Amino acid sequence: MERSVYAVDAAIEETHWWFSGRRRLFARELQRGGLTARACALDTGTSAGVNLRMLRELGFRNITGLDISEDAVAFCEGKGFGPVEQGDICAMPFADDSFDLVLATDVIEHVEDDEGALREIARVLRPGGALLLTVPAFELLWGPQDRVAQHKRRYRLKPLAEQLTVAGLRVQRAYYFNYLLFLPTLLMRRTIDAFGLGWKNIGQANAPLLNGLLSAIFAWDILTAPLVKPPFGVSILVVAAK
């Protein structure tokens, strides 16, 4: 990703509706899976440390981060979220069967060989270990945020589940989320493209009133999405096991 994206994420990740809402969603999924704070956890693609903050708040202590970017490593270590190693998700510097939990949230869409990345995740997971994965959904939503984040693709749920199975992972739960904002997101991205507007990062939508409104909508979204399993959403969440 562009360094400016890491800088924006680092500045807002603690309070922005998207990051704080996702932390709540991920925390619920991890608690539902019964993982204890003794679990050995790996966060791949740390970016500015959003998941590392969440894992610490949940009481996890044996946490390792991995990101290919020197900037991401520096931002995380600057916030005291280390250790974070610099490395490639397709060739991770860890032994087989090293982790009880791997997080890969909005990571594999950045990688040319996403199937190779999933195989590497399966390799470093211990038997019975869990993967928490999220990706952006629906090519229809492709827009400036994808370009500035240097995404390679967006996903659909069924083909993604098939990729995970081929990689040696068993899908336990999978659903679209951020479905309540699907249409507004689509309209916003088409408008930005049509009029050549310069707004490229969701972090720029962080005025207090707007942030509060979107926080309330997203809170209801992530509470209901696992139950209603909507047929569309801006993102996909998958919990899988080795």
Image: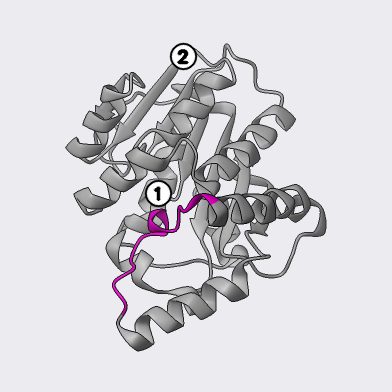
| Mark 2, residue position | 62
Q: Decide if residue 20 is in sight here.
A: yes
SS of the residue under disc 2 = loop
Q: Is residue 191 above or below residue 38?
A: below
Q: Residue at x 69, y 50 (%)?
A: 222
At horizontal 50% and vertical 39% (from top left) the residue drawn is 15
Q: For the C terminus, which image quadrant?
A: top right
Asked whether 158 or 142 is in front, the reply is 142
The image quadrant that residue 96 belongs to is top left
How much space separates mark 1 and mark 2, taking CA atoms?
21 Å
Residue 241 visible to an observer of this rendering: no
Residue beneath disc 1: 107
- Which portion, as a residue range, is magenta? 197-208
Query: In the rendering, at what x and y percent does residue 213 appear?
Result: 63, 55
In the displayed structure, 134 sits above or below 57; it is: below
43 sits left or right of 83 in the view: right
| Vertical comparison of 38 with 192: above or below | above
Tell me which amino acid carries mark 2: Asn
**Residue 72 lies in the magenta stretch:** no
147, 215: nearer the viewer: 215
Q: Residue at x 81, y 52 (%)?
A: 227
